[in-house]
Image: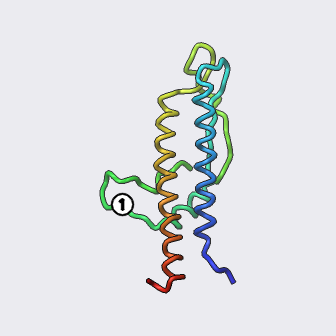
Amino acid sequence: MKLFSNTFQTLENALNYSSSKQKVISQNIANVDTPNYKAKDVRMDHSFQTMLDASINAYRTDRRHYDFKITPSVPSAIVTKNNFQYNNNRNSVDIDQEMSDMATNQIYYNAVTDRLSGKFQSLQNVIRGGK
């Protein structure tokens, strides 16, 4: 018998993805001036994305809120972006895109940690008997 649903494992995988994404973005930013450096990215498996979307029971109450369904496509395959060249030194890091990805990843991380915190608060409430 399983004590908990797969939600905790799914949220753990989401945190691992976000951590990997942050590391890759940091490496890209650190190598923005390195000649011949090819930017990297982290890709999620489609099945993981579907499972994650199903486990996060959130809805937008305003069109300006973050849409949970548009997260980058499981942890995690790190891929090299070979088709781009932004500098004369054959470096493919676009600093504006990396900063944008970092902000998006931060929002994603905050949403997942908030959901995980809510799950733990629910468990605490059950353990205390609703008090």
| Residue plotted at (53% across, 64% down) | 116
Q: Quadrant of the C terminus?
A: bottom left
Tell me the crowding category of disc 1: few under 14, some 14 to 19, or many 20 or more residues within 10 angstroms, Cα based: few
Residue 106 percent across, percent down from the top left: 49, 46
Question: Which residue is found at the position 47% from the left and 44% from the top?
Answer: 104
In the image as oriented, which residue stretches furthest toward the bottom?
129
Whether residue 27 is visible: yes
Quadrant in which the N terminus is drawn: bottom right
Q: In screen coordinates, is 116 left or right of 42? A: left
Q: Which residue is mark 1?
A: 60
- At horizontal 62% and vertical 76% (from top left) the residue drawn is 4
The residue lying at 58 percent from left, 36 percent from top is 25
Q: Secondary structure at mark 1?
A: loop
Q: Nearer the viewer, residue 129 or 46?
A: 129
Q: Please indicate whether residue 50 sits to the left or right of residue 79 in the image.
A: left
Whether residue 86 is situated above or below residue 59 in the rendered picture: above
Task: Indicate the position of residue 66 as horizontal and vertical percent values.
Answer: 40, 53
Quarter of image, res 89: top right
Residue kind at label 1, given as amino acid type: Arg
Name the quadrant containing residue 8.
bottom right
Residue positioned most to the top: 88
Q: Is residue 81 above or below residue 55?
A: above
